[in-house]
C-alpha cells in the first residue's frame, strides 16, 4: 500500500502493525485462534484509523 500523504505511515513500516502481526503469529503458534482473530481485528481497526484503509478491506488469511 502506498501512503496517501506524508502524515500517513505505510502499514508495512508501522510498528503497531508489526506488533499485531507478531502477536498473531505467536497466538497461532500456541494454537490460540481466538487471540489470533483478536489481533487481526485490532490490526484492521488500527489500519482504518491510522492508515486510512477502508474497514471493509480484508487481508488474506
Image: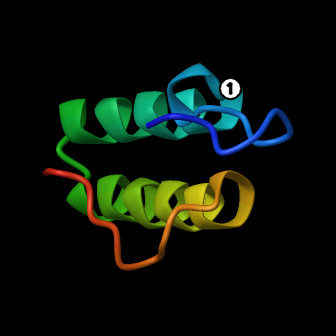
Mark 1 neighbour class, 10 Å CA radius: few under 14, some 14 to 19, many 20 or more: few
Determine the residue positioned at 33% across, 41% down: 27
> Which image quadrant: the N terminus?
top left
Determine the residue positioned at 46% across, 76% down: 55
Please indicate whether residue 1 sits to the left or right of residue 19 in the image: left
User: In x, y percent, where is residue 56?
Assistant: 36, 79
Q: Which residue is mark 1?
A: 15
Farthest residue, direction right: 7
User: In x, y percent, where is residue 54?
Assistant: 48, 72
Please indicate whether residue 20 sits to the left or right of residue 33 in the image: right
| Above/below status of 45 relative to 6 | below
Mark 1 residue element: helix
User: In x, y percent, where is residue 12?
Assistant: 50, 25
Farthest residue, direction top: 13
Say which quarter of the image contains residue 22. top left
Please indicate whether residue 39 sits to the left or right of residue 9 in the image: left
Name the foreground residue: 43 vs 12. 12
Determine the residue positioned at 32% across, 53% down: 36
Determine the residue positioned at 58% across, 55% down: 47
Farthest residue, direction front: 5
Say which quarter of the image contains residue 10. top right
Name the foreground residue: 49 vs 19. 49
Here the colouring is rainbow
Amino acid at each position: 500500500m502506498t501512503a496517501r500523504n506524508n502524515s500517513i505511515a505505510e502499514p508495512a513500516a508501522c510498528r503497531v502493525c508489526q506488533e499485531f502481526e507478531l502477536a498473531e503469529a505467536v497466538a497461532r503458534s500456541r494454537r490460540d485462534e481466538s487471540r489470533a482473530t483478536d489481533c487481526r481485528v485490532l490490526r484492521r481497526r488500527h489500519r482504518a484509523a491510522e492508515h486510512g484503509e477502508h474497514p471493509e478491506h480484508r487481508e488474506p488469511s
